[in-house]
Amino acid sequence: MQKTFHIRYTSDIHGYFFPTNYADTQEREIGLLRLLPDYPHDGNTLLLDGGDTLQGSPFTNFYERLPEEEKLSQLSDNPFGTHPAAAVMNLAGYHYITLGNHDFNYGLEELHVYLDQLKAVCLLANIRDKAHRLPLRKYTIHTLENGLRIGLAGVTSHNIRVWEKAETVEQLEIEDAYTSAKEVYEELRNQCDFSILIYHGGYECDLNTGRVLSSDSENQACQICTDIGYDLVLTGHQHIAQPGMTYGLSYTVQPPYRASGVCSIDITIDDGRKNISSTILPASAPASPEGLRFLRPLEERVQAWLDTPAGKLDRALPFVPHLQAALHQSLIANFINTVQLAYSGAQISSCALPNEYKGFSDSPTIRDIVSTYIYSNTLVVLSISGADLKSYIEHTAEYFSLSPDGKICLSERYMRPKVQHYNYDYFSGIDYTIDVRRPVGDRVTRMEFNGHPITPDERMTLCINSYRFSGTSDYSMLPSQPVVREVLTDVSDAIIEYILQHHPVHIDTHHWSRILPDNS
Protein backbone atom coordinates (compact mmCIF):
# COMPACT_ATOMS: atom_id res chain seq x y z
CA MET A 1 0.00 0.00 0.00
CA GLN A 2 1.40 3.39 -1.00
CA LYS A 3 1.89 5.98 1.70
CA THR A 4 3.30 9.50 1.43
CA PHE A 5 4.64 12.01 3.92
CA HIS A 6 6.36 15.38 3.77
CA ILE A 7 9.18 17.27 5.50
CA ARG A 8 10.05 20.93 5.77
CA TYR A 9 13.64 21.33 6.92
CA THR A 10 15.64 24.40 7.88
CA SER A 11 19.09 24.82 9.40
CA ASP A 12 21.46 27.63 10.34
CA ILE A 13 18.79 30.26 10.92
CA HIS A 14 21.36 32.15 13.03
CA GLY A 15 18.83 34.43 14.68
CA TYR A 16 17.38 35.75 11.42
CA PHE A 17 13.68 35.79 12.18
CA PHE A 18 12.77 39.11 10.54
CA PRO A 19 13.01 39.73 6.77
CA THR A 20 16.18 41.84 7.06
CA ASN A 21 19.92 41.28 6.98
CA TYR A 22 20.40 44.20 9.44
CA ALA A 23 23.05 45.83 7.24
CA ASP A 24 20.23 48.21 6.30
CA THR A 25 16.48 48.41 6.88
CA GLN A 26 15.44 47.07 3.48
CA GLU A 27 13.06 44.10 3.53
CA ARG A 28 14.50 40.97 1.92
CA GLU A 29 13.54 37.37 1.17
CA ILE A 30 15.07 36.13 4.38
CA GLY A 31 14.01 35.23 7.90
CA LEU A 32 11.92 32.51 9.54
CA LEU A 33 8.87 34.73 9.79
CA ARG A 34 8.68 34.66 5.97
CA LEU A 35 8.97 30.87 5.80
CA LEU A 36 6.55 29.71 8.47
CA PRO A 37 3.27 31.01 6.91
CA ASP A 38 3.62 28.35 4.20
CA TYR A 39 4.35 25.46 6.58
CA PRO A 40 1.73 22.70 6.34
CA HIS A 41 0.34 21.43 9.62
CA ASP A 42 -1.09 17.95 9.25
CA GLY A 43 -0.49 14.48 10.59
CA ASN A 44 1.75 13.46 7.70
CA THR A 45 4.18 16.40 7.70
CA LEU A 46 7.27 16.79 9.89
CA LEU A 47 8.87 20.17 10.57
CA LEU A 48 12.57 19.76 11.36
CA ASP A 49 15.57 22.02 12.02
CA GLY A 50 19.31 21.36 12.05
CA GLY A 51 20.51 23.90 14.60
CA ASP A 52 22.54 27.11 14.84
CA THR A 53 19.44 29.08 15.76
CA LEU A 54 20.55 31.16 18.75
CA GLN A 55 23.58 33.11 17.51
CA GLY A 56 24.61 35.09 14.48
CA SER A 57 22.34 38.12 13.99
CA PRO A 58 22.24 41.60 15.53
CA PHE A 59 18.81 40.62 16.90
CA THR A 60 20.22 37.81 19.03
CA ASN A 61 23.35 39.87 19.77
CA PHE A 62 21.20 42.62 21.28
CA TYR A 63 18.99 40.17 23.18
CA GLU A 64 21.99 38.49 24.79
CA ARG A 65 23.28 41.87 26.01
CA LEU A 66 20.11 42.51 28.01
CA PRO A 67 20.07 41.97 31.79
CA GLU A 68 18.25 38.79 32.78
CA GLU A 69 15.24 40.66 34.18
CA GLU A 70 14.83 42.52 30.89
CA LYS A 71 15.01 39.29 28.92
CA LEU A 72 12.14 37.88 30.95
CA SER A 73 10.02 40.99 30.45
CA GLN A 74 10.36 41.28 26.67
CA LEU A 75 7.73 38.64 25.81
CA SER A 76 6.15 38.23 29.22
CA ASP A 77 2.59 37.89 27.88
CA ASN A 78 3.42 35.83 24.81
CA PRO A 79 1.70 32.41 24.65
CA PHE A 80 4.54 30.95 22.57
CA GLY A 81 7.24 31.60 25.19
CA THR A 82 9.38 34.39 26.61
CA HIS A 83 12.59 33.36 24.82
CA PRO A 84 12.31 34.92 21.32
CA ALA A 85 13.97 32.04 19.46
CA ALA A 86 11.84 29.43 21.21
CA ALA A 87 8.73 31.55 20.64
CA VAL A 88 9.28 31.75 16.87
CA MET A 89 10.10 28.05 16.60
CA ASN A 90 6.95 27.23 18.60
CA LEU A 91 4.85 29.51 16.41
CA ALA A 92 6.23 27.71 13.36
CA GLY A 93 5.28 24.35 14.89
CA TYR A 94 8.59 22.50 14.68
CA HIS A 95 8.47 18.87 15.79
CA TYR A 96 12.17 17.98 16.12
CA ILE A 97 15.49 19.82 16.08
CA THR A 98 19.13 19.17 16.76
CA LEU A 99 21.68 21.68 18.07
CA GLY A 100 24.45 23.39 16.13
CA ASN A 101 27.82 24.43 17.47
CA HIS A 102 26.77 28.09 17.74
CA ASP A 103 23.82 27.18 19.94
CA PHE A 104 26.39 26.63 22.72
CA ASN A 105 28.02 30.08 22.30
CA TYR A 106 26.07 31.81 25.06
CA GLY A 107 26.59 29.03 27.60
CA LEU A 108 24.52 26.14 28.90
CA GLU A 109 22.24 28.30 31.06
CA GLU A 110 20.96 30.23 28.05
CA LEU A 111 20.69 26.99 26.07
CA HIS A 112 18.69 25.45 28.91
CA VAL A 113 16.23 28.36 28.90
CA TYR A 114 15.75 27.98 25.14
CA LEU A 115 15.25 24.21 25.20
CA ASP A 116 13.04 24.36 28.27
CA GLN A 117 10.61 26.64 26.42
CA LEU A 118 10.88 24.86 23.08
CA LYS A 119 7.98 22.56 22.23
CA ALA A 120 10.03 20.67 19.67
CA VAL A 121 12.01 17.66 20.89
CA CYS A 122 15.78 18.11 20.71
CA LEU A 123 17.50 15.03 19.25
CA LEU A 124 21.23 14.90 19.99
CA ALA A 125 22.93 11.54 20.28
CA ASN A 126 26.58 12.55 20.60
CA ILE A 127 26.44 15.22 23.32
CA ARG A 128 25.26 15.03 26.92
CA ASP A 129 25.52 17.60 29.68
CA LYS A 130 27.01 16.10 32.80
CA ALA A 131 24.40 17.70 35.05
CA HIS A 132 21.54 16.18 32.96
CA ARG A 133 19.71 19.51 32.78
CA LEU A 134 19.38 19.78 29.01
CA PRO A 135 16.36 17.87 27.62
CA LEU A 136 18.21 15.88 24.95
CA ARG A 137 17.16 12.58 23.37
CA LYS A 138 19.25 10.28 21.19
CA TYR A 139 16.41 9.35 18.86
CA THR A 140 12.68 8.93 18.60
CA ILE A 141 10.13 6.91 16.64
CA HIS A 142 7.38 9.18 15.32
CA THR A 143 4.20 7.53 14.07
CA LEU A 144 2.46 9.52 11.35
CA GLU A 145 -1.28 9.75 10.81
CA ASN A 146 -0.98 7.29 7.92
CA GLY A 147 0.70 4.75 10.21
CA LEU A 148 4.26 5.08 8.96
CA ARG A 149 6.88 4.85 11.71
CA ILE A 150 9.62 7.43 11.19
CA GLY A 151 12.89 6.98 13.07
CA LEU A 152 14.69 10.26 13.74
CA ALA A 153 18.10 10.89 15.29
CA GLY A 154 20.31 13.94 15.64
CA VAL A 155 24.06 14.57 15.92
CA THR A 156 26.24 17.66 15.69
CA SER A 157 29.88 18.26 14.82
CA HIS A 158 32.09 17.03 17.66
CA ASN A 159 34.48 19.90 16.89
CA ILE A 160 32.45 21.78 19.49
CA ARG A 161 35.05 20.49 21.93
CA VAL A 162 37.70 22.68 20.26
CA TRP A 163 35.49 25.60 19.19
CA GLU A 164 33.63 26.28 22.42
CA LYS A 165 34.74 28.00 25.60
CA ALA A 166 36.54 25.67 28.00
CA GLU A 167 34.01 26.27 30.77
CA THR A 168 31.22 25.09 28.48
CA VAL A 169 33.08 22.05 27.14
CA GLU A 170 33.94 20.97 30.69
CA GLN A 171 30.22 20.53 31.38
CA LEU A 172 29.67 18.26 28.38
CA GLU A 173 30.40 14.73 27.23
CA ILE A 174 31.06 14.93 23.48
CA GLU A 175 31.43 11.91 21.20
CA ASP A 176 32.36 11.54 17.55
CA ALA A 177 29.39 12.46 15.35
CA TYR A 178 29.87 9.62 12.85
CA THR A 179 30.29 6.98 15.55
CA SER A 180 27.17 8.14 17.42
CA ALA A 181 25.15 8.34 14.20
CA LYS A 182 26.09 4.75 13.41
CA GLU A 183 25.33 3.47 16.90
CA VAL A 184 21.91 5.09 17.07
CA TYR A 185 21.04 3.84 13.57
CA GLU A 186 21.57 0.27 14.74
CA GLU A 187 19.14 0.96 17.59
CA LEU A 188 16.33 2.45 15.53
CA ARG A 189 16.63 0.75 12.11
CA ASN A 190 14.38 -2.21 12.95
CA GLN A 191 11.81 -0.05 14.73
CA CYS A 192 10.83 2.15 11.78
CA ASP A 193 9.74 2.25 8.17
CA PHE A 194 11.95 5.20 7.28
CA SER A 195 15.06 6.58 9.01
CA ILE A 196 16.23 10.21 9.19
CA LEU A 197 19.42 11.71 10.59
CA ILE A 198 19.49 15.43 11.36
CA TYR A 199 23.20 16.25 11.23
CA HIS A 200 24.64 19.65 12.04
CA GLY A 201 27.62 19.12 9.81
CA GLY A 202 28.30 19.21 6.10
CA TYR A 203 29.87 17.48 3.14
CA GLU A 204 33.57 16.67 3.08
CA CYS A 205 33.42 15.49 -0.54
CA ASP A 206 32.30 16.76 -3.92
CA LEU A 207 28.83 15.21 -4.14
CA ASN A 208 29.10 14.80 -7.92
CA THR A 209 32.53 13.17 -8.12
CA GLY A 210 33.17 11.88 -4.60
CA ARG A 211 36.53 13.66 -4.52
CA VAL A 212 37.59 14.44 -0.93
CA LEU A 213 37.66 18.20 -0.38
CA SER A 214 38.45 18.27 3.33
CA SER A 215 40.09 15.76 5.65
CA ASP A 216 38.97 17.65 8.78
CA SER A 217 36.38 15.68 10.78
CA GLU A 218 34.35 18.90 11.11
CA ASN A 219 32.18 17.55 8.26
CA GLN A 220 31.34 13.84 7.92
CA ALA A 221 28.11 13.75 5.92
CA CYS A 222 29.59 11.90 2.95
CA GLN A 223 31.02 9.20 5.19
CA ILE A 224 27.68 8.93 7.00
CA CYS A 225 25.80 8.63 3.69
CA THR A 226 28.25 6.08 2.30
CA ASP A 227 28.65 3.80 5.31
CA ILE A 228 25.61 3.77 7.57
CA GLY A 229 22.27 3.46 5.80
CA TYR A 230 19.92 6.25 6.87
CA ASP A 231 17.25 6.78 4.26
CA LEU A 232 17.57 10.56 4.57
CA VAL A 233 20.48 12.66 5.90
CA LEU A 234 19.60 16.28 6.59
CA THR A 235 22.77 18.39 6.80
CA GLY A 236 23.74 21.95 7.72
CA HIS A 237 26.64 24.00 9.08
CA GLN A 238 28.24 24.81 5.72
CA HIS A 239 25.55 27.26 4.52
CA ILE A 240 25.46 25.48 1.15
CA ALA A 241 22.12 25.17 -0.60
CA GLN A 242 21.83 21.52 -1.72
CA PRO A 243 18.30 20.85 -3.06
CA GLY A 244 18.73 17.10 -2.78
CA MET A 245 20.37 14.04 -4.31
CA THR A 246 21.26 10.45 -3.56
CA TYR A 247 24.80 9.95 -2.28
CA GLY A 248 25.94 6.49 -1.27
CA LEU A 249 23.14 4.78 0.68
CA SER A 250 21.22 7.95 1.55
CA TYR A 251 19.30 10.83 0.07
CA THR A 252 20.68 14.11 1.37
CA VAL A 253 19.84 17.83 1.40
CA GLN A 254 21.12 21.07 2.89
CA PRO A 255 19.06 24.28 3.14
CA PRO A 256 20.44 27.81 2.74
CA TYR A 257 21.22 29.77 5.88
CA ARG A 258 19.48 32.74 7.54
CA ALA A 259 16.12 31.13 6.68
CA SER A 260 16.33 32.35 3.08
CA GLY A 261 14.83 29.05 2.01
CA VAL A 262 13.48 25.75 3.30
CA CYS A 263 14.00 22.22 1.99
CA SER A 264 10.66 20.73 0.99
CA ILE A 265 10.94 16.94 0.84
CA ASP A 266 8.32 14.44 -0.34
CA ILE A 267 8.65 10.73 0.48
CA THR A 268 6.52 7.93 -0.92
CA ILE A 269 6.79 4.36 0.38
CA ASP A 270 5.14 1.61 -1.67
CA ASP A 271 5.67 -2.03 -0.68
CA GLY A 272 9.05 -1.15 0.82
CA ARG A 273 10.19 0.91 -2.16
CA LYS A 274 11.11 4.45 -1.16
CA ASN A 275 10.93 7.39 -3.51
CA ILE A 276 12.31 10.76 -2.35
CA SER A 277 12.14 14.10 -4.13
CA SER A 278 12.95 17.57 -2.85
CA THR A 279 13.35 21.22 -3.68
CA ILE A 280 14.24 24.46 -1.90
CA LEU A 281 11.37 26.91 -1.43
CA PRO A 282 12.43 30.58 -1.07
CA ALA A 283 11.33 32.84 1.79
CA SER A 284 8.88 34.72 -0.40
CA ALA A 285 5.69 34.74 1.68
CA PRO A 286 4.65 37.84 3.63
CA ALA A 287 6.03 37.65 7.16
CA SER A 288 3.78 36.05 9.77
CA PRO A 289 1.52 38.79 11.24
CA GLU A 290 1.42 37.04 14.61
CA GLY A 291 5.18 36.70 14.75
CA LEU A 292 5.61 40.35 13.80
CA ARG A 293 3.16 41.33 16.51
CA PHE A 294 4.93 39.74 19.45
CA LEU A 295 8.50 40.31 18.26
CA ARG A 296 8.04 43.86 16.93
CA PRO A 297 8.70 45.72 20.22
CA LEU A 298 12.02 43.90 20.69
CA GLU A 299 12.92 44.37 17.01
CA GLU A 300 12.27 48.12 17.30
CA ARG A 301 14.70 48.27 20.21
CA VAL A 302 17.24 46.37 18.12
CA GLN A 303 16.88 48.78 15.20
CA ALA A 304 17.20 51.83 17.47
CA TRP A 305 20.35 50.36 19.01
CA LEU A 306 21.80 49.64 15.57
CA ASP A 307 21.30 53.24 14.49
CA THR A 308 23.15 54.61 17.52
CA PRO A 309 26.21 56.65 16.39
CA ALA A 310 29.45 55.07 17.60
CA GLY A 311 31.93 57.84 16.82
CA LYS A 312 34.17 59.16 14.07
CA LEU A 313 36.92 57.64 11.91
CA ASP A 314 39.44 59.63 9.90
CA ARG A 315 38.35 57.71 6.79
CA ALA A 316 35.60 55.38 5.62
CA LEU A 317 36.28 51.64 5.57
CA PRO A 318 34.07 50.27 2.78
CA PHE A 319 33.67 46.67 1.72
CA VAL A 320 36.45 45.48 -0.61
CA PRO A 321 36.23 42.13 -2.46
CA HIS A 322 38.11 39.52 -0.47
CA LEU A 323 40.89 38.77 -2.94
CA GLN A 324 41.64 42.46 -3.50
CA ALA A 325 41.60 43.05 0.26
CA ALA A 326 44.10 40.25 0.81
CA LEU A 327 46.39 41.38 -2.01
CA HIS A 328 46.42 45.08 -1.21
CA GLN A 329 45.90 45.17 2.58
CA SER A 330 42.48 45.43 4.18
CA LEU A 331 42.14 48.63 6.19
CA ILE A 332 39.23 47.07 8.07
CA ALA A 333 41.54 44.25 9.15
CA ASN A 334 44.16 46.82 10.13
CA PHE A 335 41.57 48.58 12.28
CA ILE A 336 40.39 45.37 13.98
CA ASN A 337 44.01 44.50 14.70
CA THR A 338 44.59 48.00 16.11
CA VAL A 339 41.73 47.42 18.56
CA GLN A 340 43.01 43.95 19.47
CA LEU A 341 46.52 45.28 20.08
CA ALA A 342 45.14 48.07 22.28
CA TYR A 343 43.12 45.65 24.41
CA SER A 344 45.69 42.86 24.58
CA GLY A 345 49.04 44.65 24.84
CA ALA A 346 50.51 42.09 22.42
CA GLN A 347 53.26 42.82 19.90
CA ILE A 348 51.43 41.23 16.96
CA SER A 349 47.74 40.76 16.17
CA SER A 350 45.87 38.71 13.58
CA CYS A 351 42.25 38.74 12.49
CA ALA A 352 40.04 37.58 9.63
CA LEU A 353 37.10 39.01 7.72
CA PRO A 354 33.71 37.29 7.43
CA ASN A 355 32.44 35.89 4.13
CA GLU A 356 29.97 38.77 4.11
CA TYR A 357 30.46 42.11 5.83
CA LYS A 358 29.20 45.65 5.50
CA GLY A 359 32.16 47.92 6.21
CA PHE A 360 32.20 51.27 8.02
CA SER A 361 31.37 54.81 7.00
CA ASP A 362 33.56 57.51 8.54
CA SER A 363 30.76 58.08 11.07
CA PRO A 364 29.90 54.48 11.91
CA THR A 365 26.85 53.32 13.77
CA ILE A 366 26.49 50.22 15.90
CA ARG A 367 24.85 48.68 12.78
CA ASP A 368 28.08 49.11 10.83
CA ILE A 369 30.12 47.43 13.54
CA VAL A 370 27.96 44.40 14.29
CA SER A 371 27.31 43.89 10.55
CA THR A 372 31.07 43.80 9.93
CA TYR A 373 32.41 41.96 12.99
CA ILE A 374 29.67 39.34 13.23
CA TYR A 375 31.39 36.80 15.47
CA SER A 376 31.07 36.09 19.17
CA ASN A 377 34.80 36.03 19.94
CA THR A 378 37.09 36.97 22.78
CA LEU A 379 40.88 37.33 22.60
CA VAL A 380 43.85 35.18 23.59
CA VAL A 381 47.48 36.35 23.84
CA LEU A 382 50.06 33.68 23.03
CA SER A 383 53.82 33.47 23.36
CA ILE A 384 54.90 32.17 19.94
CA SER A 385 58.28 31.37 18.43
CA GLY A 386 59.41 32.76 15.11
CA ALA A 387 59.30 29.26 13.64
CA ASP A 388 55.70 28.68 14.69
CA LEU A 389 54.70 32.17 13.57
CA LYS A 390 56.09 31.34 10.13
CA SER A 391 54.08 28.07 10.11
CA TYR A 392 50.97 30.10 10.97
CA ILE A 393 51.50 32.55 8.10
CA GLU A 394 52.45 29.72 5.73
CA HIS A 395 49.11 28.07 6.43
CA THR A 396 47.11 31.23 5.84
CA ALA A 397 49.12 31.78 2.62
CA GLU A 398 47.45 28.66 1.20
CA TYR A 399 44.51 31.01 0.55
CA PHE A 400 46.23 31.98 -2.71
CA SER A 401 46.79 30.06 -5.91
CA LEU A 402 48.04 30.90 -9.41
CA SER A 403 45.90 30.82 -12.52
CA PRO A 404 47.31 29.34 -15.76
CA ASP A 405 48.31 32.85 -16.88
CA GLY A 406 50.29 33.44 -13.69
CA LYS A 407 47.77 35.71 -11.95
CA ILE A 408 46.96 35.27 -8.27
CA CYS A 409 43.53 33.75 -7.62
CA LEU A 410 41.79 32.04 -4.71
CA SER A 411 42.70 28.48 -3.81
CA GLU A 412 39.96 25.92 -4.42
CA ARG A 413 40.26 24.63 -0.84
CA TYR A 414 39.00 28.00 0.41
CA MET A 415 36.03 27.93 -1.98
CA ARG A 416 34.89 24.31 -1.77
CA PRO A 417 33.08 22.52 -0.27
CA LYS A 418 32.17 25.90 1.26
CA VAL A 419 33.45 29.45 1.00
CA GLN A 420 36.01 30.15 3.76
CA HIS A 421 37.28 33.72 3.43
CA TYR A 422 37.14 33.80 7.24
CA ASN A 423 40.07 31.39 7.37
CA TYR A 424 42.51 33.86 5.78
CA ASP A 425 44.27 35.92 8.45
CA TYR A 426 45.66 39.46 8.30
CA PHE A 427 48.57 40.40 10.57
CA SER A 428 49.56 43.73 12.08
CA GLY A 429 52.82 44.44 13.91
CA ILE A 430 55.07 42.49 11.55
CA ASP A 431 56.07 43.16 7.94
CA TYR A 432 56.00 39.99 5.87
CA THR A 433 56.15 38.82 2.28
CA ILE A 434 54.25 35.90 0.72
CA ASP A 435 55.44 34.68 -2.69
CA VAL A 436 52.62 32.66 -4.25
CA ARG A 437 54.97 31.38 -6.97
CA ARG A 438 56.72 29.26 -4.34
CA PRO A 439 55.43 25.85 -3.14
CA VAL A 440 52.75 25.71 -0.44
CA GLY A 441 54.49 25.63 2.93
CA ASP A 442 57.48 27.62 1.67
CA ARG A 443 55.92 30.91 0.59
CA VAL A 444 56.89 33.23 3.44
CA THR A 445 60.13 34.90 2.37
CA ARG A 446 60.27 37.75 4.92
CA MET A 447 59.14 38.38 8.49
CA GLU A 448 60.34 41.54 10.25
CA PHE A 449 59.50 43.24 13.52
CA ASN A 450 60.48 46.91 13.77
CA GLY A 451 62.75 46.44 10.77
CA HIS A 452 64.63 43.42 12.18
CA PRO A 453 64.26 39.87 10.80
CA ILE A 454 62.43 37.51 13.17
CA THR A 455 64.60 34.51 13.99
CA PRO A 456 63.11 30.98 14.37
CA ASP A 457 63.78 30.82 18.12
CA GLU A 458 62.70 34.39 18.91
CA ARG A 459 59.54 34.57 21.02
CA MET A 460 56.88 37.21 20.57
CA THR A 461 53.39 37.88 21.92
CA LEU A 462 50.56 37.31 19.46
CA CYS A 463 46.89 38.27 19.92
CA ILE A 464 44.37 36.03 18.16
CA ASN A 465 40.64 35.49 18.60
CA SER A 466 39.22 32.56 20.53
CA TYR A 467 37.94 30.82 17.39
CA ARG A 468 41.36 30.78 15.76
CA PHE A 469 42.96 29.61 19.03
CA SER A 470 40.82 26.47 18.78
CA GLY A 471 43.10 25.33 15.94
CA THR A 472 40.26 24.46 13.62
CA SER A 473 40.81 24.55 9.83
CA ASP A 474 44.29 23.06 10.26
CA TYR A 475 45.69 25.90 12.38
CA SER A 476 47.03 23.16 14.64
CA MET A 477 50.18 25.11 15.54
CA LEU A 478 48.18 27.58 17.67
CA PRO A 479 46.51 25.63 20.54
CA SER A 480 49.88 24.30 21.70
CA GLN A 481 51.37 27.77 22.23
CA PRO A 482 51.73 29.06 25.83
CA VAL A 483 48.88 31.38 26.82
CA VAL A 484 50.09 34.68 28.27
CA ARG A 485 46.66 36.11 29.04
CA GLU A 486 43.03 36.06 27.95
CA VAL A 487 40.94 39.14 27.21
CA LEU A 488 37.33 38.14 27.81
CA THR A 489 35.77 41.26 26.29
CA ASP A 490 33.73 40.44 23.19
CA VAL A 491 35.63 41.80 20.17
CA SER A 492 32.60 43.67 18.79
CA ASP A 493 32.18 45.35 22.20
CA ALA A 494 35.86 46.27 22.18
CA ILE A 495 35.50 47.85 18.72
CA ILE A 496 32.50 49.90 19.86
CA GLU A 497 34.28 51.05 23.01
CA TYR A 498 37.48 51.92 21.12
CA ILE A 499 35.62 54.12 18.64
CA LEU A 500 33.76 55.88 21.45
CA GLN A 501 37.03 56.64 23.28
CA HIS A 502 39.01 58.03 20.32
CA HIS A 503 37.96 61.21 18.51
CA PRO A 504 38.50 60.63 15.67
CA VAL A 505 39.93 57.16 15.27
CA HIS A 506 43.14 57.11 13.25
CA ILE A 507 43.10 54.22 10.79
CA ASP A 508 46.35 52.35 10.27
CA THR A 509 47.07 52.42 6.52
CA HIS A 510 50.38 50.55 6.68
CA HIS A 511 50.77 47.64 4.24
CA TRP A 512 51.98 44.94 6.61
CA SER A 513 51.90 42.26 3.94
CA ARG A 514 53.37 42.11 0.47
CA ILE A 515 51.94 39.46 -1.84
CA LEU A 516 53.96 38.40 -4.88
CA PRO A 517 53.83 38.40 -7.86
CA ASP A 518 52.83 42.04 -8.14
CA ASN A 519 51.13 41.57 -11.52
CA SER A 520 47.95 40.25 -9.96
Image: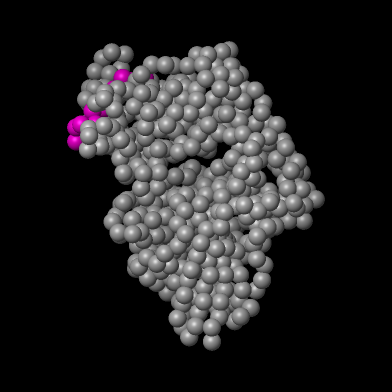
Residues 469 and 511: in front is: 511
Q: Quadrant of the N terminus?
A: bottom right
Above/below status of 501 relative to 134? above
What is the x, y in percent for residue 251? 43, 67
Say whether residue 476 is left or right of residue 44.
Answer: left
The outermost residue toward the front is: 405
Residue at point 45%, 57% (across, down): 242
Which of the colour schemes (rainbow, by chain, secondary structure, one colour) is used?
one colour
**Quarter of the image that includes the C terminus:** top left
463 versus 201 height, above or below: above
193 sits to left or right of 248: right
Q: Residue 430 in magenta? A: yes
Q: Residue at x 65, y 23 (%)?
A: 309
Residue closer to the observer: 246 or 213 = 246
Q: Position of residue 317 (x, y in %)?
A: 50, 22
The answer to whether residue 275 is above or below residue 181 is below
In this orientation, which residue lies closer to the viewer: 277 or 333? Answer: 277
| Magenta-tinted stretch | 429-439
Q: How many marks?
A: 0
Magenta-span inclusion, residue 202: no
